[in-house]
Image (tube, rainbow, N blue to C red):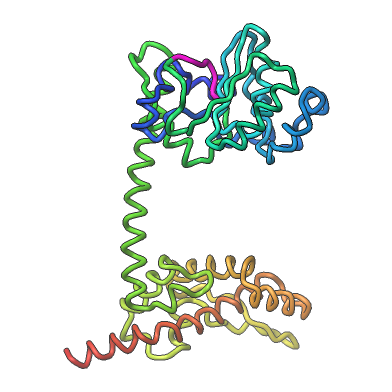
Amino acid sequence: MTARDALAVVDADQCCTPTAAAANASCCGGGGAVGAAFGSSLYSADEHGELPAEAVAASLGCGNPMAVAELRAGERVLDLGSGGGIDVLLSARRVGDTGFAYGVDMTDEMLALARANATKAGATNVEFRKGTIENIPLPDAAVDVVISNLPRVALIERCAGLRPGTLTSVLAATKHTLRATARRWVLLNTEVLAHEKILTELTKQVVPDLVTAHGIGPDTASEMLIVAGDNAARVRSEPAWARLLGVAPVPASSGLTNRHRLNRGGHRQANAALYRAVIVRMQFHEPTKAYVARRTAEGKTKREIIRCLKRLLAREIWTLMKPFREASGTTAMAA
């Protein structure tokens, strides 16, 4: 499938109706991650020269969809979220006098700027209308190509609202496949969000401080609770907890060299959860970043630093899980 075919999947003849848009959170979309063709710096000098400076300045780094849209003379184009109008004006030039370009934006300020830019550019085959992606102010079969820089979730929602019609063409089959895949993603994503909400509530009830610790969250907290609950008889001290998680250092000294290596034992899922939390902290946690810088200056490798951080994090988690241990001890005594 070419770039043009991907954009044409959401053509207007079956998708861009106000009814369908309202029912399906706007079924129209044609963007996505298309790689290096997008980026405000990739508007060519010739394209900059064709447009008013105000239009270029108002692009806000949205990119250059025309680099992949392959617009043809005589086509009708719709730009969702047109902003200052740069993509609409460029589209108007690509489709020529026999074509037309529509821009839809939800703010009066951007619509006024876009119309002023169109006047300055001398564009007569453009029109800007107020509306939203959920309620496109155009009739059915009004456009041939939809351009927009949609985020992933918005693109999936629009694919879920496609209407393939009778499966007598490659385009209809592609729409059918995209819709089925998107609807399954939406269903599973809704289920995941519901489970995550429940998991967050439950973990906060048991170990609230652990859930809010930097880089931990409900997923890692629940993993730690599962490991501790399954091994209550084995975990009676912080060193035992570290050994269970596979972060107790193993001596690996030889001759005059005094060093330790990673422990390959322990609970591997819990160890992986610790690793993910450490990586997050190494990127976004200032005390951890300072620790990494200090240990690097001391000659430690990244692998050794991660081992040390996992051991320190295991000790921190043991302390934060004190309410859980106390509650488990009380329950055991009552039994």
Q: Position of residue 239 (x, y in %)?
A: 47, 88
The residue most toward the left is 335
Q: Is residue 236 above or below residue 311?
A: below
Q: Is residue 2 visible?
A: no
Q: Quadrant of residue 300?
A: bottom right
Q: Position of residue 80 (x, y in %)?
A: 54, 30
Q: In the drawing, does residue 313 fall left or right of residue 35?
A: left
Question: Going 33% across and 80% down the picture, which residue do you hit?
Answer: 231
Q: In the drawing, does residue 313 fall left or right of residue 296?
A: left
Q: Position of residue 90 (x, y in %)?
A: 69, 22
Query: Quick one: 287 or 235, which is closer to the camera?
Result: 287
Q: Quadrant of residue 26?
A: top left
Q: Which residues, given as a range, are shown in magenta?
A: 141-146
Q: Is residue 142 visible?
A: yes
Question: Going 57% across and 70% down the picture, which residue do you hit?
Answer: 278
Q: Is residue 79 above or below residue 172?
A: below
Query: Quick one: 280 or 263, which is closer to the camera?
Result: 280
Question: Going 67% across and 14% down the picture, which residue do you hit?
Answer: 124
Question: Going 37% across and 41% down the picture, which residue do you hit?
Answer: 186
Magenta stretch: helix, strand or loop mostly: loop
Q: Position of residue 79 (x, y in %)?
A: 57, 26
The N terminus, quarter of image: top right
The residue most toward the bottom is 333
